[in-house]
Amino acid sequence: MSTADDDLSNTYNPIYNLIRARPVFVTHHETGPLFLAPPFLGPLLFPNADSDARDHCANERTFLSWLRLSLYMAIVAVAIVISFHIKNEPTKVERKTAYPVGLVFGALALACLGSGVAGYVRTVQRYGERRAMVQSGWKTQVVFTVVAAVIVAACVLFLSTNARQAR
């Protein structure tokens, strides 16, 4: 490490770094998973060359979008499982289908969270290797397609049970 790196690691101690972990300089990281580089909870410091800062912000926004989608799916799963109704009691069919449909939405919430974390970690690892491309892969497309299909199927299911109830 150079003296500039020593100066930065000695002065780097923001309020949120309660355990005072030393930063991991990504330019000095050679092998292995970047997130498991010692110190384990140390912040990752990347050199800001070209458009790296913009790409990091875009990667974090993408992760936060996945997290938001996961939270929405989890909220919908809980609402379905508890058969949330404001005006009247749920019907027998609604109670019978609530648990499996809620489990599907819960599983999709976990899949969305896993996809977001995996994409974020993979992209940051590639930033460290200076070969990152900000794009979506086939796994992302599969998760989005399954989520969209389940949402449409749930809407059709809810509309059909509501139509039967109106008769």
Image: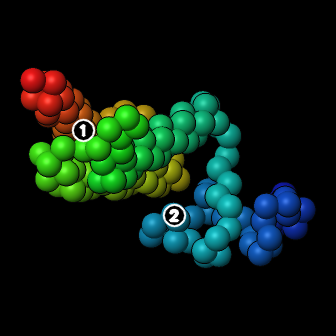
Residue with the mark numbered 1: 147
Of residues 67 and 116, which is closer to you in this image?
A: 67
Which amino acid does the dot numbered 2 rest on?
Answer: Leu
Of residues 39 and 26, which is closer to you in this image?
A: 39
Q: Residue at x 68, y 68 (%)?
A: 42
Q: Say whether residue 141 is visible.
A: no
Residue with the mark numbered 2: 34
Taking the image as shown, residue 50 lies to the left or right of residue 17, namely: left
Q: Say whether residue 89 is visible.
A: yes
Taking the image as shown, residue 106 lies to the left or right of residue 16, namely: left
Q: Residue at x 21, y 56 (%)?
A: 99
User: Residue 140: which quarter of the image?
Assistant: top left
Give percent across and percent down for residue 87.
37, 35
Describe the colour scheme in one phrase: rainbow
Q: Residue at x 48, y 41 (%)?
A: 68
Give percent across and percent down for residue 130.
49, 46
Give percent across and percent down for residue 96.
14, 53
